[in-house]
Amino acid sequence: MGLQRTLSIIKPDGVKKGVVGEIVKRFENAGLSVIAMKMKTLSRNEAEGFYAVHRERPFFGELVEFMTSGPVVLMILEGEGAIAKNRELMGATNPADAAPGTIRADFATDIGENTVHGSDAIDTAAFETSWFFAGIEINTVERI
Ligand code: ATP
Ligand code: MG
């Protein structure tokens, strides 16, 4: 599988619930390193472009509305099999279906306000990391 990078977002509900630290801790404990990080309130353009693949879905408007409703924390996580590992830590999209102990099972309230985002494949991870981070904002982190 090898070393991968993936985009993680702590969505507005996660920031408002005060679980940023708890979520980052779970990533770090699982061996994922934060190699880029910033807090930002997304503009409509930034959110629409990011979720362009979902443009035709019935919940697109609601999704963009929610994602621009408050600050989010954007991160690039790096590690062995980081894409799948992050998705495993997040749990299923609908928190009602998320496995116990996952981020969404523990903190999310509904399918829309589901606390975290994680890239789902190598190509989407490449697009999503470059959508929010310039090369100069990405760091080298060696875990000790
Ligand atoms: P994410 O892309 O946020 O990591 P995901 O890959 O698990 O989540 P997707 O199918 O890519 O899920 O949907 C993107 C996001 O759109 C979901 O995280 C959720 O916030 C929202 N969403 C998905 N399905 C619905 C729905 N039926 N109603 C409302 N919002 C939805
Ligand atoms: Mg997705």
Image (cartoon, rainbow, N blue to C red):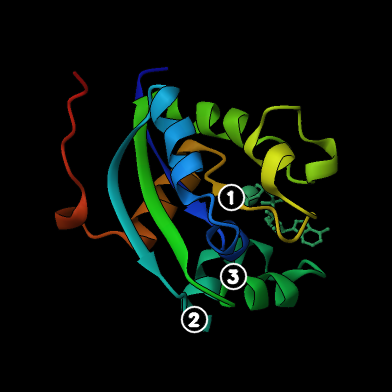
N-terminal of the two: label 1 or label 2? 2
Give me the C-alpha separation between circle 1 and circle 2.
Answer: 20 Å
C-alpha span from label 2 to label 3:
11 Å
Mark 2: which amino acid?
Asn
**Label disc, if present, on residue 133 of the rendered structure:** none
Question: Which residue is identified by label 1?
Answer: 116
Estimate the x, y position of residue 85 in percent, counting from the top left: 52, 26
Q: Does residue 104 appear to the left or right of 87 in the view shown?
A: right
Element at label 3: helix
Residue located 77% across and 66% down the image: 57
Quadrant in the rendering for residue 140: top left
For the C terminus, which image quadrant? top left
Pinpoint residue 77: horizontal percent, then vertical percent: 37, 38
Residue furthest out toward the front: 18
Is 23 placed above or below 141 here? below
In the picture, residue 101 is in which quadrant?
top right
Residues at marks 3 and 1, CA–CA distance in whole angstroms: 11 Å
> Residue 136 appears at what percent x and percent y?
14, 56
Asked if 3 appears above or below 74 in the picture, the reply is above
Mark sitting on residue 67: 3
Q: Secondary structure under badge 1?
A: strand
What kind of residue is marked 1?
A: Val
Question: Quadrant of the rendered structure where residue 14 is?
Answer: bottom right
Q: Residues within 10 Å of mark 3 (few under 14, many from 20)?
A: many
Which residue does the numbered mark 2 point to in the structure image?
45
Q: Residue at x 50, y 40 (%)?
A: 22
Q: Are marks 3 and 1 in contact (CB under 8 Å)?
A: no
Q: How dense is the environment of label 2, judged by Cα within 10 Å: few (below 14), some, or many (20 and up)?
A: few
